[in-house]
């Protein structure tokens, strides 16, 4: 097949065996790649009995047909597994250069099973792979490890690795890549699964070119459209993903004080927003491969209590969860906490949410100063947040409990802690308030990996985005109810396609629509496809991921938002108090999906999509 390397690398760590497997072209055409194809492998090779941290679980790294081609913003890869945080389907997406280099090394993906008897790392290069000893590297953080492994392999290699958090089984440990630029497969605990297999890192390099069906046509289309995307995304290039943080605060979308804050936080929001970062600590910007946007931040702090900091800066989600969710408006403290999360290898969303949860538990006297290690977990204390990040990364004291995630932590603390442990299916809530977006709320509730703003990106279509090919000619008013279940279902199908192709969703902010993306797919692969057929694949992928979860017992009972979002209205000057009518929207969503009222895909729908 054109557009693919044509091989999957199979690694059994228990047997120390490496095998090359031909890519199944039929499956590639049905599920494309990325988390779509990886979901099919996970469905076929695991089941409800699979222990996420057991050797039988699969850890799947997958690129898509756009990786290592000229397609803009295609420097991405997916990591798919069964989550130790949620117990169900997990996918995490990372940018940078690791994915394209895996493709150039001759592989579309890597499927890892088993558990090594001692720490190892994997070296993948020019169609070959080696399992190497990593005993001396165990315990290293991801920044230091990057240079050490490149010295042992080749300096141009790209490394994906875990830090001490993944080694210690923090349930929201991430897999980091691209060294100090801090790109992350962050959500769902993929790093904990990697650690459970005693796999420290995967280094990749290669120079193989990807054959394309119509390279001249592709380049001509890109020459026409790339300048438009770059121009429309100028704001993101200037101030990063946090450029809109103050606007989100004014809208009532920015998370505050574990989601219970009433009132406005505008002056504090301005202190940590993108423009403040640009002015105070920015040293440069980072582009993932083939990116024309450049939203990545490089920052430096060389004096003061949080020095030194140097490398990838905090994204919007980090500023929102480690910052505003904890009422911290100290930008340098957040940047330090972000770097520590990168070095230890932890999801900044779940980490920040766990600390905010602990602050509320401390406020309610459900945990004592003795249990915190004499730390006063007070709102707004940036120094305390930094110390708690270190404790979680090392699994020390209260950090050991918080490293379990808010769902398990609340269960162990007991009393009424469950009331303020905000998660969906065990995954902590990201930085966009579902009381602010009705479609965004139902998308959180139904996302296959748990609370996720990227699975549907629905909230963006209630604010600024349009997509005529799915009937969204202009953004839908945020607080309308009718049609929001349909919007969430349609956008989830589209985002599943982005995650299969490995295409950055920020191209939508650049004005890109579906039609040219489908044309690029045909130009790369040679497979003729129209928009309707493309969307059908997206629907197939989403339903397959749902069926992974259905086998694990997921149903309507789990498609729910935390009680705080359904009972506590958010108030403040200029804000519109709203509680999403989840039940009504969810019923519409199920009907559009072809699922029954319990949230189970109907047999007829599965047959229509060619699923088991």
Image: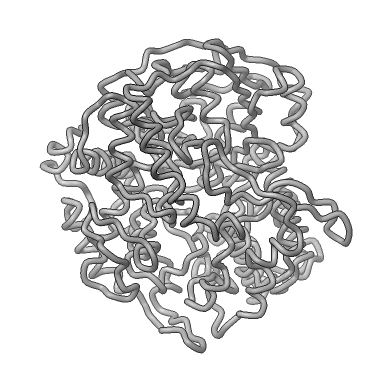
Instruction: Residue lying at the far left in this picture: please name it.
Output: 604
Instruction: Residue lying at the far bottom in this picture: please name it.
Output: 573
Residue occupying image coordinates x 52% and y 20%? 104
Residue occupying image coordinates x 70% and y 50%? 284
Residue 267 lies left or right of residue 415; in this view the side is right
In the image, 279 versus 424, the foreground residue is 279
Image height of 123 relative to 71, above or below: above
Quarter that holds the N terminus: top left
Residue occupying image coordinates x 84% and y 51%? 308
Q: How is the image coloured?
A: one colour
Image height of 79 relative to 214, above or below: below
Residue 545 falls in which quadrant of the image?
top left
The x, y position of residue 225, in whole percent, is: 40, 45
The x, y position of residue 252, in whole percent, is: 49, 77
In the image, 372 versus 209, the foreground residue is 209
The x, y position of residue 49, in whole percent, is: 39, 34
Quarter that holds the C terminus: top left
The x, y position of residue 162, in whole percent, is: 65, 35
Q: From this viewpoint, is residue 260 visible? A: yes
Residue 70 lies left or right of residue 204; in this view the side is left
Q: From this viewpoint, is residue 12 visible? A: no
Residue 360 lies left or right of residue 100; in this view the side is right
Residue occupying image coordinates x 32% and y 51%? 492
Residue 585 falls in which quadrant of the image?
bottom left
Residue 511 falls in which quadrant of the image?
bottom left
Q: How many marks?
A: 0
């Amino acid at each position: 097949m054109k557009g693919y390397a044509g091989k999957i690398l199979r690694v059994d760590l228990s047997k120390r065996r490496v095998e090359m497997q031909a890519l199944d072209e039929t499956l590639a055409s049905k599920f494309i790649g990325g988390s779509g194809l990886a979901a099919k492998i996970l469905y076929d090779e695991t089941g409800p009995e699979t222990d996420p941290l057991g050797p039988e679980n699969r850890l799947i790294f997958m690129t898509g047909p756009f990786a290592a081609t000229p397609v803009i913003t295609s420097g991405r890869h997916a990591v798919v597994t069964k989550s130790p945080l949620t117990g169900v389907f997990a996918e995490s997406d990372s940018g940078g250069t690791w994915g394209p280099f895996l493709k150039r090394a001759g592989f579309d993906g890597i499927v890892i099973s088993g558990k090594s008897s001692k720490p190892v790392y994997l070296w993948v290069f020019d169609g070959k792979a080696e399992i190497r000893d990593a005993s001396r590297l165990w315990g290293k953080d991801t920044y230091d490890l990057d240079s050490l492994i490149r010295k042992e392999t080749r300096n141009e290699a790209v490394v994906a690795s875990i830090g001490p958090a993944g080694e210690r089984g923090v349930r929201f440990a991430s897999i980091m890549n691209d060294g100090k630029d801090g790109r992350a497969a962050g959500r769902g605990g993929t790093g904990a699964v990697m650690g459970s297999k005693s796999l420290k890192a995967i280094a990749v390099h290669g120079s193989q070119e990807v054959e394309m069906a119509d390279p001249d046509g592709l380049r001509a289309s890109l020459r026409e459209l790339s300048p438009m995307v770059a121009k429309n995304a100028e704001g993101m290039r200037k101030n990063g993903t946090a450029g809109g943080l103050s606007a989100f605060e004014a809208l009532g979308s920015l998370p505050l004080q574990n989601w219970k804050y009433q009132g406005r936080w505008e002056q504090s929001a301005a202190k940590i927003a993108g423009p403040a970062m640009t002015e105070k600590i920015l040293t440069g910007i980072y582009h993932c491969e083939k990116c024309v946007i450049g939203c990545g931040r490089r920052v430096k702090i060389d004096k003061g209590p949080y020095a030194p900091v140097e490398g990838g800066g905090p994204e919007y989600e980090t500023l929102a969860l480690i910052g505003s969710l904890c009422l911290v408006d100290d930008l340098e403290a957040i940047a330090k906490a972000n770097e520590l999360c990168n070095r230890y290898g932890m999801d900044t969303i779940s980490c920040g949410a766990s600390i905010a949860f602990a602050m509320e538990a401390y406020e309610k006297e459900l945990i004592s100063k003795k249990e915190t290690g004499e730390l006063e977990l007070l709102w707004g204390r940036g120094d305390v947040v930094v110390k708690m990040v270190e404790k979680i990364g090392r699994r020390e004291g209260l950090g050991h409990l918080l490293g379990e995630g808010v769902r398990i932590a609340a269960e162990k603390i007991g009393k009424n802690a469950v009331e303020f442990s905000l998660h969906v299916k065990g995954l902590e809530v990201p930085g966009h308030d579902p009381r602010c977006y009705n479609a965004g709320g139902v998308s959180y509730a139904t996302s296959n990996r748990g609370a996720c703003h990227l699975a549907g990106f629905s909230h963006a279509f209630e604010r600024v985005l349009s997509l005529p090919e799915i009937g969204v000619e202009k953004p839908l008013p945020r607080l309308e109810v009718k049609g929001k279940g349909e919007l969430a279902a349609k956008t989830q199908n589209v985002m599943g396609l982005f995650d299969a192709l490995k295409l950055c969703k920020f191209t939508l902010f650049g004005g890109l629509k579906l039609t040219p993306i489908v044309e690029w797919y045909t130009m790369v692969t040679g497979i003729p496809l129209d928009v309707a057929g493309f969307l059908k694949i997206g629907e197939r992928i989403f339903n397959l991921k749902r069926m992974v979860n259905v086998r694990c017992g997921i149903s309507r009972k789990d498609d729910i938002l935390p009680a705080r979002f359904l009972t506590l209205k958010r108030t403040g000057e200029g804000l519109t108090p709203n509680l999403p009518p989840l039940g009504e929207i969810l019923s519409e969503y199920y009907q559009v999906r072809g699922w029954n009222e319990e949230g189970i895909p109907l047999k007829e729908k599965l047959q229509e999509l060619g699923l088991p």
